[in-house]
Image (cartoon, helix red, strand yellow):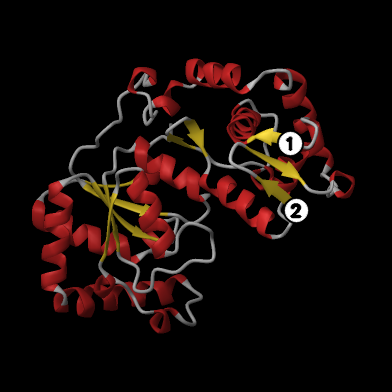
Amino acid sequence: MFQRQKVMLHLIDRAGGRMDRLRLMKLAFLARQEGHLTAETATYGFVPYQFGPFSFTMYRDLAKLTEENVLVEDRAAVGIKERSDLPRLEAASKVGVDAVWERYGSWDTTRLLQHVYATYPWFTLNAKDPAKRALSRPTGDVAVYTAGYEGLSFDDFLNRLLACGIRRIVDVRANPVARRYGFHRSTLERTLARLDIDYRHVPELGIPGEERGGLETMADYARLFARYEAETLPRQRSAITMVTTLLRERPSALLCMEADPAQCHRSRLGKRVASETGMPMQDIRDVAAA
């Protein structure tokens, strides 16, 4: 069981073994935002959604633990099936749970929500009630944006897209599957739609997995990308034209996996589009997250 899941179970246990899901979400959010839980393994990422900060990963974990018969869910709340069999927390995580519960354990859901909205206005921008939106959703300038999800949780990646004003993802992976939750095509496309971000997949501009085998040195990568620029891109004029049109229509990011754009083919494709259109190019990692 992941450490973040253990933390979630211990928060529920502090409430007597059953807790409103919205309250649980806000407690986990405050635990991260206020630094009570600092290890990435013990925290969830969050994105502005209908009722403030929301974690798609946490929601998926709740469903998974319910399937595994660890939790019992109903329409309003989630409960621990066997409180006597809680997994042990790492010491630092236990201190974090103790701290957040000491501060907010007596607060009900309404009070927590009001506090989060007032203290973290960024997370109100997709609020279901328009009157609660303290900020307007940003829209980036039209440019050639690139995005890599390596090293980011799914929710932190989504939050970065919103902060950059991205309105469309152009997935240039040849095969859009991923071990990390959220980045498989079906999950990604479905979740982006909930955030009103368009998704397009252009596999012909990717690099097939068999061509990536055996890459070990910088020279290996340099040869791969040189071949991509010299052979693949010239053969894909129609696909590049389509991508250029998509990028001109609205703020869009070319998506692949690697954190460093210099070590990813998306930067070579981006440079080609930028040179042909005069649009500026920027990786979303260079934009401060909200």
In the picture provided, is 262 more to the left or to the right than 98? left
The residue that label 1 is drawn on is 18
Residue 261 visible in the snapshot: no
- From this viewpoint, which residue is outermost toward the bottom? 210
Which quarter of the figure is the N terminus placed in? bottom right
User: Residue shown at 53%/58% (left/top)?
Assistant: 181
**Image location of residue 236, percent across then percent down:** 16, 75
Local packing at callout 1 (Cα closer than 10 Å; few below 14, some 14-19, many 20+) is many
Asked which secondary structure carries label 1, the reply is: strand
- From this viewpoint, which residue is outermost toward the front? 75
Question: From what the image shows, is residue 113 above or below residue 188?
Answer: above
Asked which secondary structure carries label 2, the reply is: loop
The residue that label 2 is drawn on is 70
Question: From what the image shows, is residue 31 above or below residue 200?
Answer: above
Local packing at callout 2 (Cα closer than 10 Å; few below 14, some 14-19, many 20+) is some
**Image location of residue 26, percent across then percent down:** 59, 29
Nearest to the observer: residue 266 or residue 77? 77
Marks 1 and 2 sit apart, C-alpha to C-alpha, by: 12 Å
Residue 44 image label: none
In the figure, residue 126 lies in which quadrant? top left
In the picture provided, is 57 more to the left or to the right than 28? left
Nearest to the observer: residue 110 or residue 94? 110
User: Residue shown at 39%/64% (left/top)?
Assistant: 185
Q: Amino acid at mark 1?
A: Arg
In the figure, residue 210 lies in which quadrant? bottom left
Residue 115 visible in the snapshot: yes
**Image location of residue 193, percent across then percent down:** 33, 49
Nearest to the observer: residue 197 or residue 208? 197
